Image (spheres, rainbow, N blue to C red):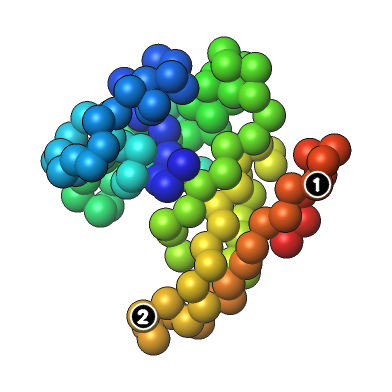
Amino acid sequence: MHGGLSPELANPQQISRIMRPTEVPDEGLLCDLLWSDPDRDVQGWGDNDRGVSFTFGNEIVDTFLKKHDMDLICRAHQVVEDGYEFFADRRLVTVFSAPNYCGEFDNAAAMMIVEEDLRCSF
């Protein structure tokens, strides 16, 4: 995923049904997939400082993964200091590949390698 989860995402097949190319709306499923962010201080869904989409807490990640028999959500688009950062007991990872983003951040970059046995390394 680029951003994160959406309260409108009932099943992953909805993602493949999004018409492409398309304009990104100010709200709804596509907007949330691009712009939602995890937040350790949020229970459920919360307001996003970006002014668009939502933030989501640990239990949203856990519920989504259990419902769809998945183990990990990998996302991007959010600057993280070490280039990657785990959330929700390592059940979601943010990977950011642009070091020193826009010359304004002192962040590292990362790439994630997923082995055949699904072991991840950075």
At 25% from the left and 53% from the top, the residue drawn is 50
Q: Position of residue 37 (x, y in %)?
A: 40, 45
- Report which residue position mark 2 lands on: 102
Rendered image quadrant of residue 48 = top left
For this view, does 13 lie left or right of residue 117?
left
Q: Position of residue 23 (x, y in %)?
A: 16, 43
- Report which residue position mark 1 lands on: 115
Which numbered disc covers residue 24? none
Q: Position of residue 68 (x, y in %)?
A: 58, 16
At 48% from the left and 53% from the top, the residue drawn is 76
93 in relation to 101, above or below: above
Q: Residues within 10 Å of mark 2 (few under 14, many from 20)?
A: few
Q: Amino acid at mark 2?
A: Cys
For this view, does 16 lie left or right of residue 58?
left
Q: Disc 1 versus disc 2: distance between alpha carbons?
A: 31 Å
80 in relation to 17, above or below: below
Query: Is residue 83 at all visible to an observer of this figure?
Result: yes
Q: Secondary structure at mark 1?
A: loop
Q: Position of residue 118 (x, y in %)?
A: 79, 39
